Amino acid sequence: MTDLLQLLFAGLSQGAVYALVAIGFVAIFTVSGVINLAQGEFAALAGLVAISAVGSGLPLLAAVVLAVVSVALVAVIMERLVIFPVKRMTTLVSLILTLGVSTGLKALMLLVYGPNAEGLTPLTPGGFSLGGVSIRYQELWILLIAGVVSLAVYWFYERTLAGKSLRACAEQPVAARLVGISLTKASLLSFLIAGTVGAIAGVLASPIYFTSWESGLTLGLKGFVAATLGGLISVRGAVLGGLLLGVLETLTAGYISTGLRDAVAFLLLIIVLVARPAGIFGRTAEARV
Amino acid sequence: MSLEVRGLHAGYGRLAVLHGIDLTAGEGELVAVIGANGAGKSTLLRALSGLLPVTSGTVHLAGTDVTGYGPEKLARTGLAHVPENRLVFPSLSVADNLVLGGYTRRRGPASARKEARDRAMALFPRLEPRLEQAAGTLSGGEQQMLAIARGLMAQPRVLVLDEPSVGLAPRLVGEIFSALGKLRDDGLTLVVVEQNARAAFAVADRVSVMDRGRVVLEGDPAALSTDPRVSGGFLGGGFAADADATTEAAPATGATRAADRR
């Protein structure tokens, strides 16, 4: 029983990181049909920026803010340079373009930060044991902050004019233009959101899961799987998908084999794409966020 | 003139669809544009609202040259386009659809937004009890009403509508068109593109008949409704006896029709 609780808790905190990465995929995909393969690199870059900022003497919180702001900026620049100039964007073209950005960012991170994996200083070091389940404070921070960020993103899409205008672009791009919403501004805003949540995921995960120039690959793929579980168009689905994936992974690693951990994600992806392409929580393929 | 179109040419890539359209609508006038499938009516509206680039010709909106404006800028300048098939935002509530209709007026006075909304509600009282419902759950007629109300939220000078009657029961068509008549009586300028000539003739002040990317006839509805070319055109599916179904794709053969223009 303690084992199960331990695995569930670890799975949820891991899943919360996936959920944030998944929200980034959803934010961009719904607006422009772009699948951003550099989403994982946003997280890795944020982790590395924060680590090196702390290393050069910046206080932890300032380093985190610096990392999130600079990665959000990278996402916005990426949109302007790579996505905006393309006249007829299709999902396939977007895969090729963002794969290029992902590779470029990886090379840049390797050059600047070197090949070693490091962990950011935790927000609160240490942990405690509760009924035999050992809990790190950082894991609680992950759950808390990921929860707050998810709620904030959800609130943004449901309640604010800017959020509603993004949903309008996702559902009826022609009508959105006719009521005066600029699709290019919407796309830029969606990258800003994706960069910000991706960066938050990166700095939250780094103290426990460590960050290197190539850690964005796995994180990005897991986030993509989580987003797909939720149908790729729903923030709620992405969060649930992320948590589900995290839990299934740790359960597999704990009860079956650690080696199968990463296979779970892709097995799930194949099953969902074949059996329920609209996502396991989706009723229809209708666009919503 | 609220809307003045002169010599408008437009098309899709290298395919020219409109070959010099002239169209005017004065303040508080309801102009119907009718024509068979493929005559270029929707293309005309898409060019008017900036969805499609204009190749040549000019468009003036309340005296301002708006040729080449994109849809966002045109919406801000005062042209609202109610698109074909309504295109409401399905997962958003009716109220949110209306809020987004007023997107270009978001920095304007709240009182003006509220007034626009009250007027739209008075015009379509059926929408009022459904404000919190997702727009995708409305019936076709209600979605059309919502699409028009959304257009009105932009507080436009000119409202252009693409086939508002399509797919609706005759009673609803009557309801929609009488609402358009009311808007005209309140001083709004309307351009309605329709295949349903009967509904359009009943409320229009003037009618333009399009064929193969040109305006081939123009006049008041009473005179045109008895014109054999109009009824023959609609019942026969084209204007000339040799008209083929793919009129849009045959720009060159349309040249002879210039003689029909007034």
Image (tube, coloured by chain):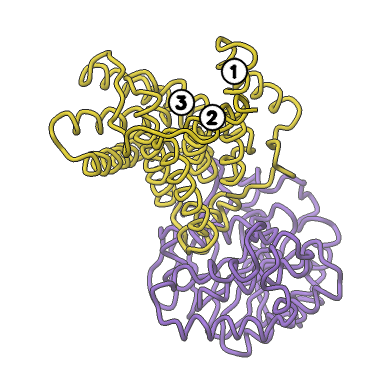
Work out whether residue B221 can be spotted: yes
Question: In the structure shown, which secondary structural element does the residue marked by tag 1 occupy?
Answer: helix
Numbered label attached to residue A132? 2
Chain A rendering hue: yellow
Q: Going by the picture, which residue comes out furthest to the left? A: A57
Is A158 situated above or below A99?
below
- The answer to whether mark 1 and mark 3 are in CB contact below 8 A is no
Q: Residue B211 carries which label?
A: none
Tell me how far mark 3 sits from mark 2, CA to CA: 29 Å
Quick check: do tags 2 and 1 share a chain? yes
Q: What residue type is labelled 3?
A: Leu
Please give the residue where the numbered disc 3 appears in the rendered image: A219
Hue used for the chain lettered B:
purple
Whichever of callouts 2 and 1 sits on the residue coming sooner in the sequence is 2
From this viewpoint, is residue B220 visible?
no
SS for tag 3?
helix
The three-letter amino acid code for the residue at tag 1 is Gly
Name the residue at 57% across, 26% down. A7
Q: Nearer the viewer, mark 1 or mark 3?
A: 1
Q: Residue at x 75, y 79 (%)?
A: B126
**Chain ID at mark 2:** A
Between marks 2 and 1 in the image, the one whose residue lies nearer the viewer: 2
Q: What amino acid does circle 2 point to?
A: Gly
Quarter holding the N terminus of chain A? Answer: top right
Q: In this view, does B22 lie to the left or right of B232?
A: left
Disc 3: CA contacts within 10 A as few (<14), some (14-19) or many (>=20): many
> Image height check: is A26 above or below A258?
below
Residue tagged 1: A254
Identify the chain of the residue marked 3, using the numbered disc in the image.
A
